[in-house]
Amino acid sequence: MKPLVLIAEDEPAQVEMLRYNLEASELNTIVATDGRSALLLLEEETPDLVVLDWMLPELSGIEVCRQIRQRRESKSLPIIMLTARGEESDRIRGLETGADDYLVKPFSPNELVARIRALLRRTRPALAE
């Protein structure tokens, strides 16, 4: 079974690039284009990992991350923050809010896939085989 990744990103070009690269790497994807939709999707689907943009409409990625960590059913869900906010203080805030990893745009799609696979190996070992 392929791992399912929730992509929470509002820029259409980024969404398409992420979907293409993740699906080419044998990962299934679902997409939310704003923070509220991401949280609603988490009530309907059970992704294995979330790739989360910080600057989302409706509800910021940092608030989505906080709410994911507060929910019993998703508190251990792996989260990679993917954002243009590259200052050290932003990276620290993202990680302290609950992100497991933090990648600054622009980024290498191959590096993102490697980071996803590394997180899945640690958190969902049955999927990484």
Image: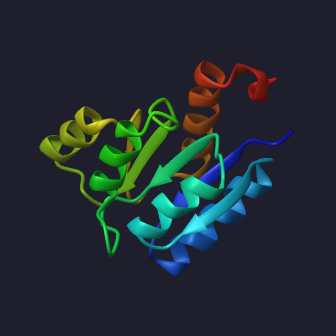
Image spot of residue 18 (x, y percent): 60, 62
Q: Which residue is drawn at 35% across and 38% down?
A: 70
Coloring basis for residues = rainbow
Residue 39 vs residue 109: left or right? Answer: left
Residue 108 vs residue 60: left or right? Answer: right
Q: How many labels does the image show?
A: 0
Task: Please identify the quarter of the rendering in which residue 85 is found.
Answer: bottom left
From the viewer's side, name the closer residue of 113 and 53.
53
Task: Report the residue that reaches farthest toward the bottom.
Answer: 12
From the viewer's side, name the closer residue of 81 and 63.
63
From the viewer's side, name the closer residue of 110 and 91.
91
Task: Report the residue that reaches farthest toward the left.
Answer: 89
Image spot of residue 16 (x, y percent): 63, 73
Is residue 21 depicted above or below 101 in this figure?
below
Image spot of residue 92 (x, y percent): 20, 36
Image spot of residue 100 (x, y percent): 41, 32
Residue 3 vs residue 5: left or right? Answer: right
Residue 90 vs residue 44: left or right? Answer: left
Q: Which residue is drawn at 53% across and 48% down?
A: 50
Q: Residue at x 28, y 54 (%)?
A: 63
Which quarter of the rendered picture does the N terminus lie within? top right
Q: Residue at x 39, y 66 (%)?
A: 35
Is residue 120 depicted above or below 44 in this figure?
above
Which quarter of the rendered picture does the C terminus lie within? top right
